[in-house]
Image (cartoon, rainbow, N blue to C red):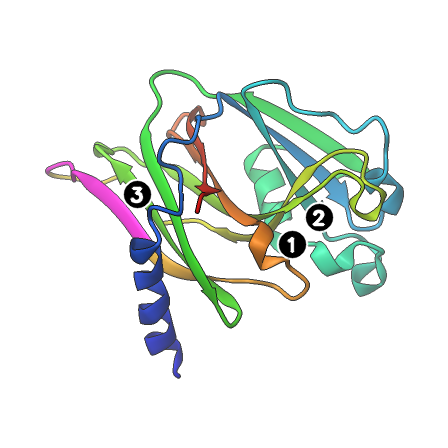
């Protein structure tokens, strides 16, 4: 199956599974805690002082490529996107670990997420924003793996970022659209437990203020 046919097949999956794995009916977090760990720092993963999220906060974990490259102890789960996320947040790459806490402001934007079944090394996803207006939006869609506390010695549960998609939702002229929508396939990297996958979406306005934080949950 060529890439175009594979993507077309996967894009239909979230529609068929929308009652199973979506952000519909899931309590919307009011804040996000992003924890960054250098791939060089295995001890940071096991640090008992790792900050934990308060009620109403979702915590996500990024592993940043380290100076040791492929020889770094956490290199297998490091993402170049983690460096881009740090840059977007105005933070330097940590030698060890760092954490950024942000609250949602204003009325929440109408962001919806859905994920389909997995097929080979891909999962189909949809990301929709209703009534977006004409302004630019900075959206980050994170494919995360839920790792229970104790995984590889971690003292806390982690939502480890496994892949990232950033839609091009720039400013628009003319009549404002009623909906911005993305349907695509996201790759599942080697070693990921597919039954532990979910989505976290973070949406910011042109001033950098977070206007929506959404996550999916799967029900039978």
Q: Write down the residue under mark 1.
A: 79
Q: Residue at x 64, y 59 (%)?
A: 192
Residue 64, labelled with which disc?
A: 2
Q: Which quadrant holds residue 213? A: top left
Callout 2 environment at 10 Å: few (<14), some (14 to 19), or many (20+)?
many
Contact (CB < 8 A) between labels 2 and 1? yes
- The quarter of the rendered structure image containing the N terminus is bottom left
Contact (CB < 8 A) between labels 3 and 1? no
Q: Give the image location of residue 122, x and y in percent.
A: 48, 66
Residue 143 visible? The answer is no
Q: Give the image location of residue 198, x and y in percent.
A: 51, 47
Circle 1 SS class: loop
Callout 3 environment at 10 Å: few (<14), some (14 to 19), or many (20+)?
some
Contact (CB < 8 A) between labels 3 and 2? no
Camera-side residue: 185 or 216? 216
Q: Residue at x 86, y 29 (%)?
A: 48
Residue extent of the magenta highlight: 175-182
Residue 128, labelled with which disc?
A: 3
In this view, the mark in front (3 or 2): 3
Mark found first going from the N terminus, 3 or 1: 1
Mark found first going from the N terminus, 3 or 2: 2
Residue 181 magenta-highlighted: yes
Circle 3 SS class: strand
Mark found first going from the N terminus, 2 or 1: 2
Q: Give the image location of residue 91, x and y in percent.
A: 65, 33
Task: State the residue lying farthest toward the bottom.
Answer: 1
In this view, the mark in front (3 or 1): 3
């Amino acid at each position: 199956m060529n890439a175009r046919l594979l993507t077309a097949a996967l894009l239909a999956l979230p529609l068929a599974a929308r009652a199973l794995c979506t952000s519909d009916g899931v309590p919307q977090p009011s804040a996000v805690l992003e924890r960054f760990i250098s791939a060089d720092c295995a001890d940071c993963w096991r640090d008992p002082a790792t900050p934990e999220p308060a009620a109403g906060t979702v915590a996500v974990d990024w592993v940043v490529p380290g100076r040791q490259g492929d020889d770094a102890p956490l290199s297998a789960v490091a993402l170049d996107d983690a460096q881009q996320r740090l840059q977007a947040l105005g933070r330097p790459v940590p030698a060890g670990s760092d954490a950024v806490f942000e609250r949602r402001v204003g009325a929440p934007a109408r962001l919806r997420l859905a994920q389909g079944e997995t097929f080979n090394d891909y999962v189909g996803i949809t990301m929709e924003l209703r009534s977006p207006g004409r302004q630019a939006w900075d959206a980050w869609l994170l494919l995360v793996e839920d790792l229970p506390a104790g995984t590889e010695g971690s003292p806390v549960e982690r939502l480890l970022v496994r892949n990232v998609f950033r839609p091009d939702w720039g400013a628009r002229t003319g009549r404002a659209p009623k909906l911005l929508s993305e349907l695509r396939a996201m790759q599942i990297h080697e070693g990921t437990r597919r039954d532990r996958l979910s989505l976290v979406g973070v949406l910011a306005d042109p001033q950098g203020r977070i206007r929506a934080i959404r996550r999916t949950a799967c029900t039978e």
